[in-house]
Image: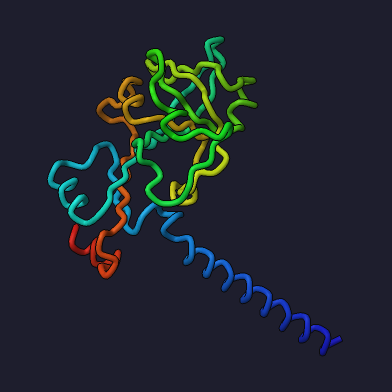
Amino acid sequence: IFLGCIILGVFAISGVNSLANSLTQGLGDQSRTILGGDVSYSFIHRQANPAELGFFASSGKVDSAATLRAMARTLNGDPALVEVKAVEPVYPAIGALRLSPDLTLSAALASEDGSFGLAVDPALLARLDAKIGDSLKIGDLTATIRATILTEPDQLGSGLGLGPRVMMLQAALSQTNLLQPGALVRWTYRIGLADQRITPEAAIADAN
């Protein structure tokens, strides 16, 4: 029994170490995709000022996104708490966004006939008993659901969400009128370093 316990313990320790090494290697291999760039800067309640944007642009390719929580309602008035993510047309800078149906980001989110598009978590459709083509009202914006999100490359780097994801363009976010003083909006700027000899640590030190 004693020898059996020792053998079992050795196998358990070896299994845990193997799993930890696999996770570490996987995170290392996919770190740029998970983060969305080489370096990430976040601001709460405000966007980056011109001087900060100039520094970001001088370091490499910049991709920005705004995230906030909001209430989404169907035209019937059914509500749901959602995690809004407002992106630029170039999103994602690193990785691939997969939608269903298979649309480009521009086709899914662009304004057509005066209505912006939305890409949403499939769970939101089930929660609101909605479907592709239905309209959602977020703040003062009424937009059309054009796709569901299958793969969001930087989802792990966005932190824990309290509701299903709703993705829109930043131009659409400005029409919600949710960007008021004191609004809990996080602006994230992800940079793909132009000079790969510069380490992320050095870029952060320069910013400080």
- Is 150 placed left or right of 34 in the picture? right
Question: Quadrant of residue 13 in the image?
Answer: bottom right
For the point 32% across and 20% down, the residue is: 175
Residue 21 lies, in percent from the top left, at: 57, 73
Q: From the viewer's side, name the closer residue of 56 and 111.
A: 111
Question: In the displayed structure, would residue 47 be above or below residue 196?
Answer: above
Q: Quadrant of the N terminus?
A: bottom right
The answer to whether residue 160 is visible is no
Q: Is residue 76 above or below residue 207?
A: above
Residue 7 in view here: yes
Q: Nearer the viewer, residue 178 or 50?
A: 50
Position in image of residue 161 (x %, y %): 50, 40
Residue positioned 49% across, 22% down in the render: 72
- Residue at 21% x, 51% y is 56
Could you tell me which quadrant the C terminus lies in?
bottom left
* Whether residue 76 is situated above or below residue 153 in the rendered picture: above
Say which of 160 and 39 sits in front.
Answer: 39
What x and y, as percent, mark residue 100? 58, 33
